[in-house]
Image (tube, helix red, strand yellow):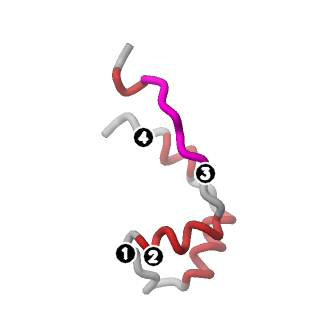
Amino acid sequence: MNDHFKETTLRPMMKVSEMGPYLKNKNIKFELITEEEAEKYLRDNNNYYNITAYKYNF
């Protein structure tokens, strides 16, 4: 079996309200949009499946 496809334990998904402080802690700045606008975007636009489709390609 390919190492990329080993069964791993995934972290639980964060709530949108938890993502703002988490991103700030990672030194991500909200300069183009406010933190509230970012939370609204994350609530309304789910890109999870688009992003995870590429996770084994890199």
Q: Is residue 44 above or below residue 50?
A: below
Whether tag 4 and tag 2 are in contact, CB under 8 A, the answer is no
Callout 3: few (<14), some (14-19), or many (20+) C-alpha neighbours within 10 Å? Answer: few
Judging by the rendered image, the residue that carries numbered circle 4 is 54
Name the residue at the left extreme. 58
Query: What residue is rendered at 54% in x and 45% in y?
Result: 11
Magenta-span inclusion, residue 40 = no
Residue 50 in the image: x percent, y percent?
53, 46
Query: What residue is rendered at 60% in x and 47% in y?
Result: 12
Q: In which quadrant of the rendered view does residue 5 lie?
A: top left
Callout 2: few (<14), some (14-19), or many (20+) C-alpha neighbours within 10 Å? Answer: few
Q: CA distance from mark 3 to mark 1?
A: 20 Å
Quadrant location, the C terminus: top left
Q: CA distance from mark 3 to mark 2?
A: 17 Å
Whether tag 1 and tag 2 are in contact, CB under 8 A, the answer is yes
Quadrant location, the N terminus: top left
Identify the mark at residue 15; answer none if there is no mark. Answer: none
**Does label 1 or label 4 sit earlier along the sequence?**
1
Q: Amino acid at mark 1?
A: Asn
**Does label 3 or label 1 sit earlier along the sequence?**
3
Query: What residue is rendered at 43% in x and 86% in y?
Result: 31
Q: What range of the chain is rendered magenta?
A: 6-13
Q: Amino acid at mark 2?
A: Lys
Identify the mark at residue 27; answer none if there is no mark. Answer: 1
Judging by the rendered image, the residue that carries numbered circle 3 is 13
Q: How many marks?
A: 4
Whether tag 1 and tag 4 are in contact, CB under 8 A, the answer is no
Magenta-span inclusion, residue 11 = yes
